[in-house]
Amino acid sequence: MASQDTASPSTPKLPPTAYELKEGETYEPLTYGQTPTEFTLKAVITGAILGVIFGAANTYLGLKAGLTISTSIPVAVLTVVAFRVLGAFGAKHSILELNMSQTTGSASSSVASGVLFTIPALFIWNMQPELAQVTLLAMSGGLVGVLAMIPLRRYLIRKEHGKLPYPEGLACAEVLVASQQGARQAAPVFWGLGLGMFFKLLTDGLKAVSGKVELALAGKAKLAVSVSPALIGVGYILGIRVASVMVGGAALSALVIIPIIDWWGQSQTAPVYPETVKLIADMSAGDIWNRYVRYIGAGAVATGGLITLVKSIPTMVESFQLGLEQLKKGVGAASSDRTDLDLNFRTVLLFLGAILLVLTLVPGILGAIDSVLVRAVAAVLIAVFAFFFVTVSSRIVGLVGVTSNPTSGMTIATLLGVSLIFLAFGWTDSAGKATALMVGTVVCIAASIAGDTSQDLKTGYLLGATPRFQQIGELVGVITSAGFVCLVVMMLDQNVEGGLGGAELPAPQAVLMKLVIDGVLDQNLPWLLILIGAAIAVVAALFKLPVLAFAVGVYLPLYTMAAVFVGGLIRWLVTRKVSEKEAEERREKGVLFGSGLVGGGGLTGVVLAVWVGVTGGKKIEGIPLPWDSSGLIAQVVATLTLATIAYAVVHFATKRHAD
C-alpha cells in the first residue's frame, strides 16, 4: 500500500457537504483518490491500549453510577497525542492511521456497557462465573454486533449521508481533521486524568477526605453530594437538563419516598413484604432504600426503558425493513472503490454461523446447562434478537447519538421475551436464569457495539477510510478489550467492600436485569412497589421529561446524582451569557477535561482494587487524621475538596490558549 505522510498545516476542514447535502450534491471523502497509510501495527496497538484504559475506567463508572460515557472523542484526542509523540522520534503517519487507532480503541466503551448491564447479576446471584466464560460471552456479543452491522453500512452510512448525522462520528472526524493543523485540544484530557486520579486517591485511597458531604434532615431524609471528580465530569458531559432530571429523580427517592415509607412504617407492627424480619420503624434510611425503594426504582427504570423503546418503534420498524431490503439486494457485491470495500459478505455469514455454533455446542459459555437443546434455543434467540436490535441500534445512533441509544430498553425487552419462553419450557432454576441472562448479555453487547461501529464507519466515510480495515479494527478492539473489561468486573467484585451490588458499586443496571429475570421465572416480585415505580415513570413521561434519566435517578442514591448535577450546573454557568462560539469552545474543553476526570477516577478505582487483590485482601487503611472522620471538620474538608474540583472544571473549561 502506498504511503502518505502526515498532512500539512494547510489541510482543509471538512466541506459543507460533510454535514448536509443539497439537491444534486454528492460528498467526496477527504482523502478520495489517495492511498494513505491506514492499517498499521502501531495504529492498531495504540488503539487497543487506549481501549483497555478507557474500558477499565468506564467499567468502574458504570458499576458505580449505572451509566457510561462515549469514549470516541477522548480516544481520538489521545490518539493524536500518541502519534505526535511517535512523530518526535521520526515516525510518520496519516490521518487514516489516526482514524484506525480511534476505531480500534472506541470499541471498548460499548463492550463495557453491555457487560455492566448484565454480567454483574451473576455475581449478585453468587454464581461466580469463570473469567474465560464471561470473556467468551463478551467477545461473542461484540463480534456478532460488528459482523451483523456490516451489511447495513452501504445504506446507512453512504446512501443516507446528509440524512443521518451520526453526531459522535462527525465530531471524531472534526477532531482528527483539526489535529492535522496542530490542534492543542489534548491538554484538558491529561489534566483531567491527573486530577481525577489525585482526588480519587485522596477520598478512596488515603481516606484523607470524606467521600461525601451530607446533611441529615427530618424523617430519615438526607441531603448529600459525592466528592467524586468522575461524577462531576459526567455531569459536565451530560449538561444541565439531563443532570437536573437525574438529580430530581434521586431527590424524589431520598427526600420524599423514604420519609413517607418511614412515616407510614411507624404504625406497622409486623414486617412488610419483601422484608420478613425488621420493622420499618427499626430501619435506617439505607435499609428502607434496599428493601423498598430499589424495587420502586427498578420499576421506574424498567418502565422508562420500555417507554423509550416504544417511542423508537417506528424508527425500529423502518430501520429493520430497510436492512432486510439491503440484504435482498445483495449487499456483498464487490466494489472497485477502496472507500466502499467491506469484509466479504459470505465471510461475515460464516463467522456469524460459527459463533452461534460454538455457543450451542461448547458447554459452559451459555451457563451451566448441559442440554444441547437449551443452548440451541438460546442461540436461536440470540440470532433473532441480535439481528433485530443491531439493525435498530445502527440507525437510531445515526439520529440521536450513542449516549441516547435505548440499549437498556432493548436488553429489558430481550430478557422479558427470553424469560417468558424459558418459563413456558419450565427452565426456571438457577441455571435457566443464568442462561437467560447470558442471552441478554450477547444481545446487549451486540446492540451497543453496532451503534459504536456505525459511528466509527461514519468517521471513516468522511475521511475516506477503507471500511474493510475499520471493520477489522473493530473486531480487534472487541477481542482485546473484552477480557480486560471482564477481568476488572471480577476483580472489583472480589476486592471492593460489599462486592457488586453493594453500597460502593451498586451496579444498578445489572440489578435491574436480575430483578426482571427473577420476577418472570420465580413469579415473586413485590408488584405493588414495581407498579409504584412504573407510575412514577409514566408521570415523568407525561411531563415530557427524559424518562429513563429520571428513572435512573430514582434508583440511585442522591449523593451520586447530586455530584452529576454539580457538573451539569457548572457547564450551564460557564456557557451562558457568552457568544455562541465561546460557549461551544467552553463546552468542548470542559467535555474533554470531564472525560479525563472520568478516566482518572475510574482508573484509580481499578488500581485500588488491584492493590487489595495483590496484597491478599488487605485494604488501604488510610492516613491518620487529627479529627473525627464523620465530624464537622471532616465535612468542611470534604466541602472544600468538592469546591476545588468544581473550580478546576471551571478553570479548564474557560481557559484560553496562549497565542
Image (cartoon, rainbow, N blue to C red):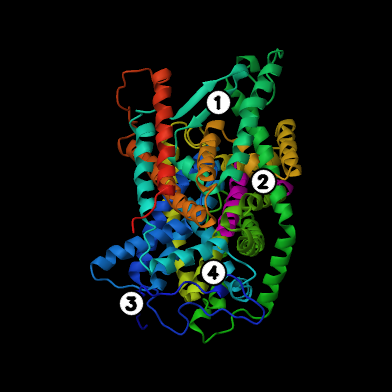
The residue stretch that appears in magenta: 423-448
**Can you give x and y, in whole percent of width and height, for residue 486 in the image?**
45, 49
Marks 2/3 in contact by CB < 8 Å: the verdict is: no
Corner quadrant of residue 184: bottom left
Q: Can see residue 473?
A: yes
Whether tag 4 and tag 3 are in contact, CB under 8 A, the answer is no
Q: Main secondary structure of the magenta part?
A: helix
Q: Residue at x 59, y 80 (%)?
A: 26
- For badge 3, the amino acid type reads Asp
**Amino acid under label 4?**
Lys
Q: CA distance from mark 2 to mark 4?
A: 27 Å
Q: Which residue is mark 3?
A: 5
Q: Secondary structure at mark 1?
A: strand
Q: Is residue 92 magenta?
A: no
Between tags 4 and 3, which lies in front?
Answer: 3
Q: Which mark is residue 223?
A: 1
Q: In the rendered view of the protein, which quadrant contains the N terminus?
A: bottom left
Identify the residue under disc 4: 458
Q: Which residue type does callout 1 highlight?
A: Leu
Earlier-in-chain disc, 2 versus 1: 1
In the image, residue 158 above or below residue 416: below
